Image: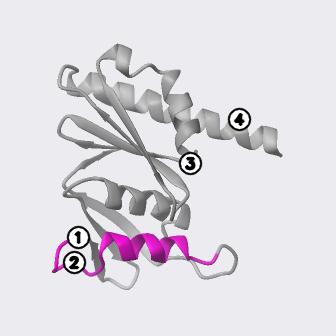
């Protein structure tokens, strides 16, 4: 099954933001494209972001990516786990993402939140980190934070329609 461009937007934002992350894209033609910031990669993260950002919004040409693999972080649903940090992509601008995160209260629960807006892709990358929470508690917090951002995005989209 072909991976949609909207998913590749999130993957490319994470590839550019998460340190030491390598992304492998398996294509329907049997080749693998390696995205990372090292000389042996097929494509650097900067180029990947621009390819995805400039993908035609309309038309029949879809990406030929069938599977995505991460090396340097573990995929846990919509969240990537990397040591004491969790990463995810919000469809909201940075300030709206911060507002959504405040409803979850990461700081009061022992985590630090950082939000970085990716102006090329039009999404925000969120990093939640904690040296005091268990891995399970940090996963739960990150999932709640992601859900808060998705909910806020849906509410904003409904009021704009």
Q: In this view, does 39 lie above or below 73?
A: below
Residue 80 picture location, percent across and down: 31, 45
SS for tag 2? loop
Residue 161 picture location, percent across and down: 83, 46
SS for tag 3? loop
In this picture, residue 13 sits left or right of residue 80: right
Q: Label 1 to label 2, Cα distance in Å? A: 7 Å
Mark number for residue 20? Answer: none
* Mark earlier in primary sequence (1, 4): 1
Residue identified by numbered label 1: 37
Residue shown at 29%/18% (left/top)?
110
Mark 3 Cα within 10 Å, few/some/many (few <14, many 20+)? many
Q: Label 3 to label 2, Cα distance in Å? A: 27 Å
How is the protein colored in the picture?
A: one colour
Front-lying residue, 99 or 88: 99
Q: Label 1 to label 4, Cα distance in Å? A: 36 Å
Q: Label 2 to label 4, Cα distance in Å? A: 39 Å
In this picture, residue 102 sits left or right of residue 85: right
112 in magenta: no
Mark 2 Cα within 10 Å, few/some/many (few <14, many 20+)? some
Q: Label 1 to label 3, Cα distance in Å? A: 24 Å
In this picture, residue 18 sits left or right of residue 147: left
Q: In this view, does 68 lie above or below 62?
A: above
Residue identified by numbered label 2: 41
Number of the front mark, 1 or 4: 1
Residue identified by numbered label 3: 91
Residue identified by numbered label 4: 155
Number of the front mark, 1 or 2: 1
**CB atoms at circles 1 and 2 under 8 Å apart?**
yes
* Mark earlier in primary sequence (3, 2): 2
């Amino acid at each position: 099954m072909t991976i949609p461009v909207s998913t590749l937007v999130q993957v490319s934002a994470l590839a550019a933001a998460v340190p030491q992350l390598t992304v492998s894209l398996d294509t329907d033609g049997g080749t693998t494209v390696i995205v990372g910031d090292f000389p042996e990669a097929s494509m650097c993260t900067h180029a990947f972001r621009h390819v995805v950002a400039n993908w035609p919004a309309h038309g029949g040409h879809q990406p030929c990516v069938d599977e995505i693999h991460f090396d340097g972080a573990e995929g846990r649903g919509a969240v990537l786990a990397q040591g004491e940090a969790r990463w995810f992509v919000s469809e909201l601008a940075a300030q709206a993402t911060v507002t959504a995160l405040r409803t979850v209260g990461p700081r009061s629960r022992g985590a630090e939140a950082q939000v970085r807006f990716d102006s090329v892709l039009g999404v925000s990358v969120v990093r939640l980190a904690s040296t005091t929470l268990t891995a399970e508690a940090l996963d739960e917090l990150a999932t709640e934070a992601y859900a808060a951002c998705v909910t806020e995005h849906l509410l904003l989209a409904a009021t704009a329609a």
